[in-house]
Amino acid sequence: MKNIKKFWPYLKGSKGLALISLICASISTLAKLAIPYVAGLAINVLTEALAKGVTSVDISAYLIIIACCCVVGALFRYLFDFSTAVLGQRVIKNMRKMVFASYNDAPISYIDKNQQGNLVLRLVNDVENVQNGLVSGFAAFYDGAIAIVITIIFMFMINWVLGLIVIGLTPVSIFTSRAISKFNAKHFKSQAKAAGEMTGFALESLNNSETVQTLGIKEGREKEFDEFNKRYRDNIFKANMGASTINPSTRLVNAIINACLVTVGSILIIKHANIGIYFAVGNLSAFLTYAANYMQPFNEISDVIAEIDYAFASFHRIDEAINAPKDINEGEKIICNEIDDLSAKNITFSYDGKRDIIKDFSLDIYKGHRIALVGPTGCGKTTLINLLLRFYDPQKGAFYANQVSTQDLEKIAFRSHIGMVLQETWIFDGTIYENIAYAKPDATLEEVRKAAEKAQALGFIERLPDGFETRVSDSSGLSIGEKQLLCVARVMLLEPEIVILDEATSNIDIRTEALLSKSFAALMEGKTSLVVAHRISTIVNSDLIVVLKDGEIIEQGNHQELMEKKGFYYSLFNAQFN
Amino acid sequence: MEKTRSLTPLKKYAFFVVLAPLVKLFEVGCELMMPFLTRYIIDQGISNSDWEFTLKMGLLLIGIAIFGFCMTMIAQYLAARVSADYGYDLRKAIYAQINRLSEKQLNKYGKQKVLTLVNNDSFSLQNGVMMFMRLIVRPPFLHLGATIISFTISWKAGLVFVASILLSAVIIGIVMFASPKRYAAIQKNLDEISTISSDSLKGARQVRAFNKQGYEQDKLSKSVDSYEKKNISLGKLNSLINPFTFLFTNLAILFVLYFCRDSIVTTGEITTGQVVSLIQYLVTSLAALIMWSRMIVSINKARASKKRADAFLELEPEIENNGDLQGKSLDENEVFRFEDVSLSYGDNSDKYAVKGLSTSIKKGTWVGIIGGTGSGKSTMIALMERLYEPTKGEIFYHGVPLDEYDLESLRKEISLVSQKPSIFKGTIRSNLLLVKPEATSEEIDRALSMSLAKEYVEKFPDGLDHPVEEAGANLSGGQKQRLLIARAILKGGDILILDDSTSALDYLSDQKVRHNISSIEGLTKILVSQRAASLKDCDLILVFENGEIVAQGKFDDLLQNCGQFRDIYEMQRAQA
């Protein structure tokens, strides 16, 4: 019930449609179930006529009613099926938009904390489950329930003794369908899990096929795969065995109800004069039709219950995503002109609240200066970039732009001063042109071309089959170096005031890197820049080199000063040329 | 040996595949019996007021139902068992094929498609087998039987019966014919939604830094809107089945009543029992029709899957092990000799990945390879591992043509650390033991120390049993590279190839690792690097440019004689 209450708001704007769908289901089911009843009445008339020896009967009234029921039943069934489909699609469309909007509004920490695949799964699969379970499933549930109720009413209208027999056998129906459906739900779940594990393992093998071959570990991997394969086989056998029990069991239960009805019904017809309960052949016929379909709604409902349960689990994940924390934009100030000075004041930061990644970090970044951050992996270089761009906020201290804490600035406005190339290249599914012009969608091809040229990306782009119109994606076969060049071109096009490069050149070979450094220099001229790299070549020309270790500045100065100091930087640098 | 195709594994089970439908025939018989008996109860029991007969028949009905149920369950069991076993065999064959094919072949076929074979196609094939075994007999025989019986009752009733079933079949057929295209479009749209969202999540930082949240939202909304439209169009189509089959079945009841009313009353040709049984046959037949449509859908899916699976299983492995070392004398001194070796990746034979490589690598030496991205360095390594066959020229290994050398020995003798973080899901230990399951803890410790991986492994509270994720996602770049080097050292062999595998290490660590490796006696070391300085002590340096070796020699010679090498070195020098 609590679940339904939670789901209710998502029906906003579709409640009328939902109501229409339920009304259509009711009308169509009523018409459908009236037919056997009326047909039974017609047969009764025929039987009576036969018994009385009358040679001509008129059952046309009954036939007309049946014809009407046919048409009404069919029409409203169509409306029901269709409106349910529309309703489901409408609900999930809005849900998807809300989930995605929530991802866009969420702070980076939320995205970092949750596995990306997991977040995509919510948007794609979980939403689909909601459509199946909560909309179609709920409609089917209602449809089944109303069919059971109407069937029982008709049966009692015809004959209460047989009605009681059917009701008496109902627990058998419920028990059978529930038991099977529970069994199935369990095994389908474990089957899906086994399938997932097996697929994951196969994917890993595929991604590393050369390694598997060169390491000579084929046999071991095959043995491991066999384990997954066996588990999957056993699960799928059980799941299929369970599923294939449904129809035969249904038929068995139906057949037993049918047999009981035929026997008792016939005896009633034979003896009805004696016991005073009216019953005739036509009534029996109607009963048999009801009995033949009696199990159906029970099966549907129990199937649907499993699906609804499943969908609610999905729904909770979606609801959680929609209610993800929002990236609060508490700042209101904006910087209209350029950022003239940028500084860090006593910043202390920790991701988990336990271990400080940055400890009391202060730094002045003068306009137009190139600052290099160096130090061993894990020293906090990347974290500083996260803090500067306000992907995370420090526990103590802050970055200041023009003497204003960046936390008092509007995020969007502040970030528009900065362009960045991150360690992890980012290429989305689209053309080369779209990828470069991402931050400046109105850029002309000429501008994009120029940016690519400056970024040294033009060469390889022109060798691609469709040049700038070539469709690329993260997995489309571009080398890491090429992807990086595109990312650089993207920033190049933007010409931001402040440039941030996070190990941007670490995956590009020395020759390309040297060319890139030239274009970086052009890009950075007159601009403030912050470079994170462990490649000395990109650092030596910096105005200030900041050597970080364990979140603290241990040395700073320019190249010459640091070399003279013969400290950590000195040993780091010398290692390269000896 | 006979070639494995997707249906080959099914041969083992041929007997059961035929048996199941035969068993199923009994059930069909039982099912047809039921309305038949009902009719006798009505026409004889009721007409003669013989309630004992009625009771007996009633018990017989239950008996038949139970017998039919048992028969079906036998068939269902066989179908579930055989299909599961078949699916298992099929996946095993597919996985074995994955390991047989070269990277190039897998890429050409498409790795995503191979993965689909493992999970989807094998599933739809086994499902097809199961549906076939379960349903191939029941619906047609049920229809056939019911049609014959209805004709024996009255030819008019028979015609109504046939018409109703045919019309329903037509509607189901139309929907089945028209929907696959729509389903495919919907799936494609869903993939697009998935791509957009994962792109946008992956680039969460860029999206925020460039202030493009609104743009991303619009992009997704557009895709989501078109997804809705496509689904509604499918819904319109699918919503046709229920109302029309309902309409045809019930109109049939109407017509049966209409045609039979006179026969019952006037001529007595048709009994009321017969009418009741006809109605029952109609209801059963419709249910069977829907079953049939389901079977056709799964068989169609299975056929499409079969095509894909066959295409994959029929691929001949490009690299085959036909090497035999018997009676061949090996050159102990020379490890590799390349004689004018070229390789073109595609079918396009004038585009070369490497061209005219000629060199000789001596045992126990340090060999350096340097050059720009895409200049052919890694291709040369791949050729040494025989991951590709040269298009032109010949490679000799210990004086024997490479393709005549036993492939497994070759790969045992080479330890390669590639650029890719080929780390498998498991633990640090499981990744190391992959290459040498019997390794002692001393050996592991030594490998970890030499690669400097020990520094960080020691810091994990669970040490070697620290879990690692696929592709080492929870390790830093430097940690991954050190683990990979440790694995290569543990593997042993005569040749160690480091393909740019210290790029994420700082200079000091890089130097230390190289120093440690030098201490392994008799080891031939091949080092692909982008740092000229790292190659100072090499006995031989190969300089690559555009797929060719433009110069080879020692460090000092190259500085004097090779412009490209000097450029690289000078550039690094100048910046210092």
Image (spheres, coloured by chain):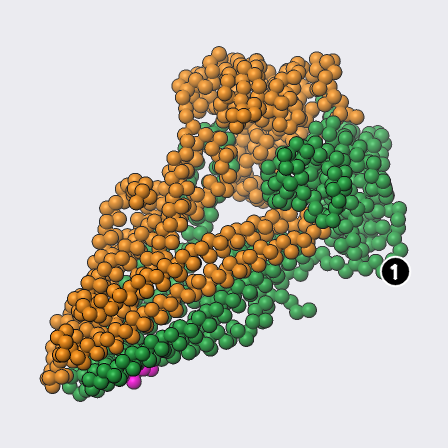
Chain colours: A orange, B green
Q: Which residues are magenta?
A: B148-153
Which residue is labeled 1 in the image?
B327
- The quarter holding residue A162 reads bottom left
Three-letter amino acid code of the residue under disc 1: Gly
- The quarter holding residue A454 reads top right
Q: How many marks?
A: 1
Q: State the residue at coordinates (18%, 83%).
A: B264
Is label 1 in a helix, a strand or a loop? Answer: loop
Return the x and y of residue B474 as percentages of the image width and height.
59, 37
Return the x and y of residue B449 as percentages of the image width and height.
75, 35
**Viewer can see residue B323:** yes
Residue B60 left/right relative to A385: left
- Majority secondary structure in the magenta region: helix
Return the x and y of residue B71 as percentages of the image width and height.
43, 75
| Closer-to-camera residue (B489/B41) | B41
- Looking at the image, the residue that sits furthest to the top is A403
Vertical side of A119 occupied by A22: above or below: below
Q: State the residue at coordinates (71%, 19%).
A: A568
Vertical side of B520 occupied by A30: above or below: below
Quarter containing the C terminus of chain B? top right
Q: State the residue at coordinates (28%, 58%).
A: A144
**The magenta stretch spans residue A105:** no
**Viewer can see residue B541:** no
| Closer-to-camera residue (A441/B138) | B138
Vertical side of A409 occupied by A463: above or below: below
Vertical side of A513 occupied by A339: above or below: above
Q: Chain of mark 1?
A: B
Residue B152 left/right relative to B540: left
Residue A451 left/right relative to B60: right
Return the x and y of residue A244 as percentages of the image width and height.
43, 65
Quarter containing the N terminus of chain B? bottom right
Q: State the residue at coordinates (70%, 31%).
A: B455
